[in-house]
Amino acid sequence: MGKSYAEIIMPYKDKKGGLIEAFHALQREFNYIPEEALKEAARIFKIPESKAYGVATFYSHFSVEKRGKYIIRMCESAPCHVAGAGEVLKALEQYLGIKVGETTPDGKFTLELCECVGQCQAIPVITINDDVVLSVSPERIPEILKKYE
Ligand code: FES
């Protein structure tokens, strides 16, 4: 069992900018800010829920949509694109059974796109949370994702 929402939020309660820091902490833990956590934050910081929601949606860094434990990002900048990013993306969608922007029903994986991550020497590139996976091909997808299952 992980920490409760309140346990994550509490340490920031009396800090300046604490709400934002609490949101960062929540997102680190869950990859997004669950609705119940938003409500908990509003209660702890004694602000209306609408305000907590407003802050969370104002910053593009935060997501209030459910996201998976692992965020897979396909680089779609030109060099990766030319090297076959489209094929890799198709293979990812097929393997996971979801489209870009969606999360697998088991809450494991979310599929997103990203810009060049500075690894153009070994393209196409995907990232999985903080891991960078180089020279990806459609055939390698099952083997790559196995590590995270
Ligand atoms: S274009 Fe994809 S890593 Fe640079």
Image (spheres, rainbow, N blue to C red):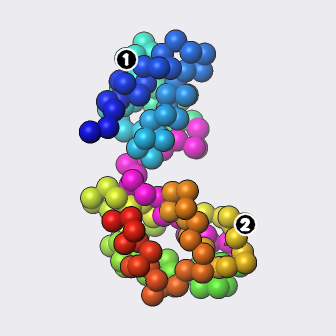
Would you say residue 70 sits in the magenta stretch? yes
Q: Is residue 55 above or below residue 104?
A: above
Task: Classify mark 2: residues with Cα within 10 Å, few (<14), some (14-19) or many (20+).
Answer: few
Q: Please, what secondary structure does the residue beneath circle 1 have?
A: helix
Instruction: Name the disc covering residue 134, or none.
Output: none
C-beta proximity under 8 Å, tags 1 and 2: no
Would you say residue 47 sits in the magenta stretch? no
Q: Confirm whether residue 120 shows in the render.
A: yes
Instruction: Name the disc covering residue 43, or none.
Output: 1
Q: Quadrant of the N terminus?
A: top left
Mark 2 is on which residue type? Answer: Gly
Q: Confirm whether residue 48 shows in the render.
A: no
Q: Identify the residue under disc 2.
A: 118
In this orientation, which residue lies closer to the viewer: 54 or 11? 11
Q: Position of residue 16 (x, y in %)?
A: 60, 16
Q: Quadrant of the C terminus?
A: bottom left
Total residue callouts: 2
Q: Position of residue 123 (x, y in %)?
A: 65, 79
Q: Position of residue 101 (x, y in %)?
A: 45, 61
Task: Classify mark 1: residues with Cα within 10 Å, few (<14), some (14-19) or many (20+).
Answer: some
Which portion, as a residue range, is magenta?
59-78
Predominant secondary structure, magenta span: loop
> Image quarter for residue 84?
bottom right
Q: Is mark 2 within 8 Å of ligand 1?
A: yes
Q: Marks 1 and 2, Cα distance to the nearest angstrom?
A: 42 Å
- Residue in the image at 40% along x and 16% along y: 44
Q: Is residue 19 above or below residue 119?
A: above
| First in residue order: circle 1 vs circle 2 | 1
